[in-house]
Amino acid sequence: MSTIPFLPPSLEIVNTWAEEIREYLTLPVVLALVVGILVVDVGILYILLLLVTHNPRPETESEKHYITVTSDGKQKGGIRLPDLLDEKVEPEVFMSVVVPAYNEELRIEMMLDEAVEFLNQEFPKGSSGRKAVNGKANGYANGHANGHIDGEREKKKGWEIIIVDDGSKDKTTEVVVEWMKKRVEKGEVEEGDLRIVHLERNRGKGGAVAHGMRHIRGQYAVFADADGATKFSDLKTLLTRLQSIESSRASPTTPSKTEYHGISVGSRAHMVNSSAVVARSWYRNLLMYGFHTFLHVIGIQKIKDTQCGFKLFTRDTARLVFWEGHCEGWIFDIECLLIAEEEKVGVEEVSVTWHEVEGTKMNLVKDSIRMAWDLVVLRAAYAVGVYGGVRRGWRRG
């Protein structure tokens, strides 16, 4: 190919170089360069994500034990918690309730009052323990609404509450212990029904929930906020809906074992135009709509309310999502739903009764920005493999 005539010497050199480059840059070479640049970019992104992603710290020895109150009203501690990640450990009760608590000395008693009244009525131990209230037997545990898959597994009875004190600086643990002593004396709870786990250092709401979930004894497990913002009796609706979508399949790690999967998500989406929401400050509603829009943009569209602190899991699904999870902050719910979607676990959104409770721990502006950042990091970390694949989650402790 000829060069352009009458060019100054300096431009003649440039023109010569351009001609040589054009001759060298064949289609295969261009494709190789593009692929190489992409690989380098992904590599740089991978390294950057390694620097900013979060891996939960291992559990300390004390965090693997719990406190309860004995039948004679005395505090008893240092009792080893069961390990949900050990698939050989069978469930002991029907329903586990995990309550993350950080500086909740003023609000947690009302929540516990409501929860225990409901649990004693709906999920009693039966003839072997507390008698059914109002003549109710444990209908759910005996196959209620779930006969299509429950024929081959033993139905458990009873309940437990695991309160995870997330490094509180107030007297949350002491308040719960005194509450337990009064209820034991009245015969409303028994030793081990309520278990307090004290985390040595604050993890965040997601970390506290995950810690409690990894030590449940139930066939089903729900986490509920300590402020009692959600009507606890709505758990009945969540359970019925979950059992209607619950599916069974062989365990990938133990083929001879059957797993049961499903999640029922409490939702306040129906309250968007209610007086409780409309009455909130304009900037709080603006942040709420902005967050929902951001979720939609990054591909989280099926669940309208991802942040309601009232979600019910089967035991096997709890093991799966809290084995895989990495987020310990406010967006841990979203990671649970992403893992469930990847694992093809059925998820159902259920309307619940909710009311505003004063004393929120959130800094609306700061935490909203943090949540948006964490969402971007979360999506990117799963996209490039920083967080690994299914069942390769980081085992704590």
Image (tube, helix red, strand yellow):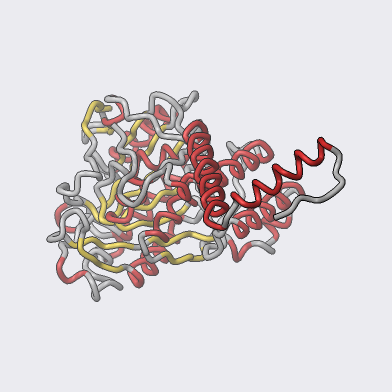
The answer to whether residue 10 of the structure is visible from this angle is yes
Residue 66, given in percent of the width and then of the height, sits at: 28, 32
Residue 14, given in percent of the width and then of the height, sits at: 76, 40
Residue 156, given in percent of the width and then of the height, sits at: 20, 58
Task: Say left or right for 113 vs 70.
Answer: right
The vertical placement of 160 against 262, above or below, is: above
Please name the residue shown 39% across and 58% down the image: 340
Q: Residue furthest left?
A: 256
Task: Say left or right for 372 vs 267.
Answer: right
Please name the residue shown 38% across and 42% down the image: 210
> Which quadrant holds the C terminus?
top left
The answer to whether residue 105 of the structure is visible from this angle is no
Please name the residue shown 20% across and 44% down the image: 86
Please name the residue shown 24% across and 36% down the image: 81
Residue 30, given in percent of the width and then of the height, sits at: 57, 52
Which quadrant of the view contains residue 31?
A: bottom right
